[in-house]
Image (spheres, helix red, strand yellow):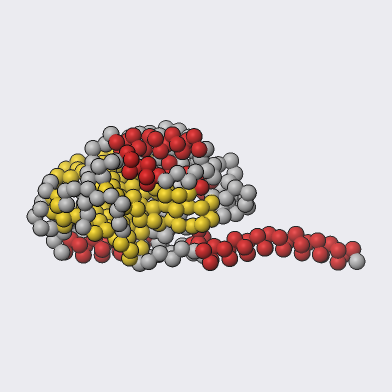
Amino acid sequence: MKRKSILRSVAKSLSLPALYFACIFTHGLYSDWQPEEKKRLISPKWVEPYEIADSVLSFVSWNIGYAGLGEESDFFYDDSGMWYSGSSMIHAPKELVDKNLSGICSTLKNTRADFFLLQEVDEYAHRSYKNNQVRSLAKALPDFTYTMALNYKCSRVPIPLLEPWHPYGMVYSGLTTFSRFRFNYATRYQLPGKYPMPDRMFQLDRCVALHRYALKNGKQLVVMNLHNAAYDPGDKIKAIQLPYLRDLAVAEYKKGNYVVLGGDWNQCPPYFRFDTFMPGNTQGYRQGNVPDNMFPEDWRFAFDPTIPTNRKCRDPYVAGKTFVTLIDYFLVSPNVQIRSVKCLDQKFRDSDHQPVWMEVALQ
């Protein structure tokens, strides 16, 4: 009898965790967002002029890290993974998120650019205390039109899995593209490649936001805002996403259009050493490169090789100690001349990424 009692106790103790995980994955399976392959994007605000007369244009690309990954923050997923938080933050304190968002808005106000390509912008999320960041950024750029392309839509992200009392929570977030000019048409394209189950149910659904602008010369400027896969060992998912982006971009160039891609590639540019800024001190990190033969030879990557654009979030940022690399940049078609490109060095004050500014001339 004693043995049966012990077995029953063991069975009960095992059944509770099994039930917990069953509930998590059942909810995740049935609430998993399945975005359309193509979806038209609209702007709540229109601006003039309708046609772009300027041949010299400026761009900024910036992953703002949902205003939750400033210099004071670390991130549990970079530290202990999906199971537990360890000593790292799941959510940054609200006062830090507010401070970071204020700093981001100030940077946008004070940076001269015709286009801002932003990633990890929350529309409604527990991690950013349900603040509509799209609206806050729009107030900082009152003369700009904008679109929002969702790439993270989950009613409840349950990680860290062993700490159900404070989960990551609800997330509605994506790519926000601001422009001084009115676009003809904007489309959200779902990128191919999926994470393995069950991680897939709670990961981002990566996309590219493509915007078409009419030019006075009768052609179009095509601007693509992207954020490729992260936490992708061996770059297996990016190996599927990159050919899709290439084919989309090259098809537009063949039509006679000018093409600019910008964003967080989660890879270094071709030939760029991932440990350039900290040689021999990789701290266990590894960052792949965009293959040198992925895009046609006459297409050009635009980046500032002297300043890192990304820092890792295992710990709060400490200059010279935290590992940094370069994964944010632009790619332009052969008919777009790169005049200048520079990383705006903020010492990772407001985000784990730094903004990259570029000026081009349409030839």
Eyeballing the image, is 178 above or below 202? above
Q: Nearer the viewer, residue 142 or 164?
A: 142
Residue 155, relative to residue 180: is it above or below? below
Along the line of sight, which residue is nearer the eye, 59 or 42? 42
- Percent across and percent down for residue 65 are 41, 44
Counting the numbered discs, the total is 0
What is the quadrant of residue 279 in the picture? top left
Name the quadrant containing residue 348: top left
Q: Is residue 360 left or right of residue 344?
A: left
Q: Residue placed farthest to the front in the image?
A: 45
Q: Nearer the viewer, residue 44 or 216?
A: 44
Residue 344 vertical position relative to residue 160 in the rendered view, above or below: above
Where residue 130 appears, as percent x and y from the top left, is: 48, 46
Q: Position of residue 25 (x, y in %)?
A: 58, 63
| Left or right position of 298 against 118 | left
Q: Is residue 85 left or right of residue 279?
A: right
Going by the picture, which residue comes out furthest to the right? Answer: 1
Q: Residue at x 33, y 43 (%)?
A: 138
Is residue 331 at least partly visible in the picture? no
Question: Which quarter shows the N terminus?
Answer: bottom right
Q: With 78 as the anchor, is 173 left or right in this view?
A: left
Residue at figure coordinates x 22%, y 54% from the top left: 183
Q: Is residue 166 visible?
A: yes
Q: Position of residue 236 (x, y in %)?
A: 41, 62
The relative height of residue 268 versus residue 323 in the rendered view (above or below) is below
Q: Tell me the residue at 32%/39% (across/down).
A: 140
